[in-house]
Image (tube, helix red, strand yellow):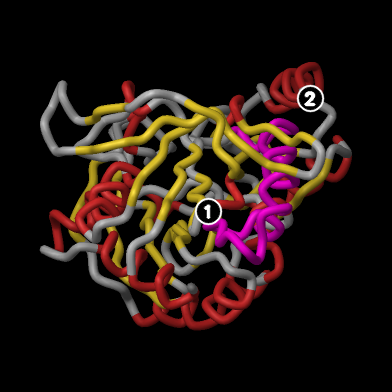
Amino acid sequence: MTLSVAIQMDPIQSINIEADSTFVLALEAQARGHSLFHYLPQHLTYREGVVSAYAQPLQVRREPGNHFTLGEARQIDLAGMDVVLMRQDPPFDMAYITATHLLEHLQPKTLVVNDPVHVRNAPEKLLATHFPQLMPPTLISADRRQILEFRAEHRDIILKPLYGNGGAGVFHVREDDENLNSLLELFTQHSREPVMVQRYLPAVRQGDKRIILVDGQAAGAVNRVPAAGEARSNMHVGGRPEKSALTRREQEICEAIGPTLKERGLIFVGIDVIGDYLTEINVTSPTGIQEINRFDAVRLEARVWDAIERRL
């Protein structure tokens, strides 16, 4: 099977080829003989029923400082592609949402991964709320009274923007912390969106586990341990990756959410688990493939492409 694959992503020039999941997905597609095209989200266009992009043929290689070649740019009709990978990083803002609406026009003729309708309907922190039995106590609200009551009940909390990413804007607010009102003022000054508040889980000191699911099946995991003095475990803010296997509880979480992911066309998903609790379901541009590959001597990108090709 030889496919034409367009990758909607951030500039390939700036990626870290030792960590970027999109890069290894492109490498695997190229190894299978698929033709690759690269375009930026801002070059996605709708005109008179046609969804196109100003795209460039792409070749990739694992050579630091020389990891890609881009051909001559031209406007391509994305309906002529077999697969479009929607892989730009959040934030999940109106530009992101608009892109999902435009890409929705391509289906079912062109397979968009992940399904843009369900990416739009399943932003990271909201899809998890459909599985409340798996989550820590959680509040989503812009009502200051509700937030203060939640803090009074649980005392030690995590406060984070509902549509943030990469650990940005995440605060650990202890019972005696006098900054909560100021933080809420800061959030409301910059956004009309509710915030997410969760009971702080001390188990985060042992790590925040990223689990990759491929077409609804658990494929591997990596534990991310926060640096000393840091409540966030994201690797770009100092979190340390560690080899990790799935616990029985984590298997139960994956089995509970897997059928929903598969049904919604969410082929490549990364979930976050702290202790026994599901905290996020990442469907926009999940990462973690390369870290798991190195620890477990596997090639998760091959599993992702196997799943894509089965769908076709």
Q: Specify the amino acid type for callout 1.
A: Asn
In the rendered image, the vertical position of residue 97 relative to residue 125, given as above or below: above
Relative side of 91 to 191, left or right: left
- What span is in magenta? 91-118
The residue located at (20%, 62%) in the rendering is 299
Q: Is residue 274 visible?
A: yes
Residue tagged 2: 191
Between residue 259 and residue 51, name the one nearer to us: 51
User: Which numbered marker is on residue 282?
Assistant: 1
Between residue 186 and residue 236, name the one nearer to us: 236
Q: Secondary structure at mark 2?
A: loop
| Rendering coords of residue 209 (x, y %) | 36, 57
Relative side of 126 to 65, left or right: right
112 inside magenta stretch: yes
Q: Specify the amino acid type for callout 2.
A: Ser
User: Which numbered marker is on residue 51?
Assistant: none
| Rendering coords of residue 274 (x, y %) | 44, 58
| Rendering coords of residue 16 (x, y %) | 26, 30
